[in-house]
Image (tube, rainbow, N blue to C red):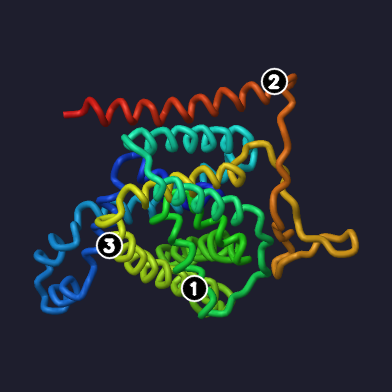
């Protein structure tokens, strides 16, 4: 789930939905409330751990953090050298996830149709927005944390793609993470002189504020979603299906990255890198071998979801 959250266009919430623990995720985060803090500050740690569904949250958050420094690095490698096939695999998984969620609807109502249309419209609209420029103001970084975490709580809405639109994807999920890993490695080796490097500390500070914003957003959004899931479960699920269908344009495998230009020259960020403006989608050439390989990975992604669905039906 953490690896999926890092990929622009892919929603970690979709992964949790497909794997069958989405509602437990929302309700577990919802338990982080005034009672939880009362138990924590009074020293009743065992009761606090039980109240917040500690074993589940520990595995979810631990796995997500671990993947940022391990699995996601492997994913970065494949995205660099086998981008088409990675996107094809995700595209297939998202197609499968629409089936996975939609099969539970026995009867569609007008409210559900309206909800799915709203979800599709928002998903498509987001995919055509133009990204903003990079902004390292701490309040804006905190806001980025709140907004980007929606990819974990709202299936079909990619937190990483939202960060691209806000202009801070490279700053927060690439540069800050890499610098933090470098600082941590040096500290483990006993090299404390790195703490005097103002530029490195700046990135650590940015990542800390971003993480705090993410934690705040995760808990607050989960409370809202927990409330609406209890009262309007089918409508929310229809909206989620709409989000996922609307995100097809973002994860469409055959696309070319467009970079911001001015007077036929690329506009560079503070580190000299090109700034992503959006993606230009195109239809594949069916006469090429790599197109058929991409189709294979799409089918593989769909098959993976169907296998998970089969396992869910037959497990004890």
Q: Look at the numbered disc 1 and give the secondary structure of its residue.
A: helix
Q: Residues within 10 Å of mark 1 (few under 14, many from 20)?
A: some
The residue indicated by pointer 2 is 289
Q: Position of residue 100 (x, y in %)?
A: 38, 34
> Which-is-in-front pick, marks 1 and 3?
3
Residue 265 visible to the viewer: yes
Marks 1 & 2, CB-CB < 8 Å contact: no
Identify whether 79 is placed above or below 168.
above
The residue indicated by pointer 1 is 143
Q: Position of residue 214 (x, y in %)?
A: 41, 67
Q: Position of residue 240 (x, y in %)?
A: 42, 49
Residue 71 visible to the viewer: no
> Which-is-in-front pick, marks 1 and 2?
1
44 sits left or right of 223 in the view: left
Instruction: Give me the disc on residue 227.
Output: 3
Instruction: Say which residue appears at 33% left-offset and 65% top-offset.
Output: 224
Disc 1 and disc 2: Cα gap in Å?
44 Å
Q: Which badge, 1 or 3, comes first in the chain's sequence?
A: 1
Closer to us: 156 or 58: 156
Disc 2 and disc 3: Cα gap in Å?
49 Å
Q: Which badge, 1 or 2, comes first in the chain's sequence?
A: 1
Which quarter shows the C terminus?
A: top left
């Amino acid at each position: 789930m953490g690896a999926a959250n890092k990929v622009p266009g892919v929603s970690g919430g979709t992964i949790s939905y497909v794997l069958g623990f989405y509602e437990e995720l929302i309700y577990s985060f919802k338990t982080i409330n005034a009672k939880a803090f009362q138990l924590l500050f009074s020293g009743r740690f065992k009761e606090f751990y039980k109240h917040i569904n500690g074993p589940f949250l520990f595995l979810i958050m631990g796995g997500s953090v671990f993947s940022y420094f391990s699995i996601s690095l492997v994913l970065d490698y494949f995205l660099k050298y086998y981008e088409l096939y990675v996107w094809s695999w995700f595209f297939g998984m998202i197609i499968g996830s629409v089936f996975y969620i939609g099969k539970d609807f026995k009867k569609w109502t007008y409210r559900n149709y309206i909800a799915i249309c709203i979800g599709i419209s928002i998903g498509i609209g987001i995919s055509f927005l133009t990204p903003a420029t990079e902004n390292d103001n701490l309040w804006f970084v905190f806001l980025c944390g709140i907004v980007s975490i929606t990819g974990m709580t709202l299936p079909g809405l990619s937190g990483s793609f939202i960060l691209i639109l806000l202009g801070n994807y490279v700053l927060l999920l690439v540069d800050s993470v890499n610098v933090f890993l470098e600082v941590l490695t040096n500290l483990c080796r006993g090299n404390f002189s790195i703490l005097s490097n103002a530029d490195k500390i700046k990135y650590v500070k940015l990542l800390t504020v971003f993480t705090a914003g993410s934690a705040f957003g995760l808990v607050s959004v989960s409370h809202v979603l927990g409330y609406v899931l209890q009262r309007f479960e089918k409508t929310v699920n229809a909206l989620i299906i709409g989000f996922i269908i609307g995100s097809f344009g973002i994860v469409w495998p055959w696309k070319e990255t467009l970079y911001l230009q001015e007077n036929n020259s690329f506009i560079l960020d503070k580190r000299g890198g090109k700034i992503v403006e959006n993606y230009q989608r195109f239809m594949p050439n069916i006469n090429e071998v790599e197109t058929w390989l991409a189709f294979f990975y799409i089918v593989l992604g769909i098959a993976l979801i169907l296998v998970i669905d089969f396992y869910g039906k037959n497990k004890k």
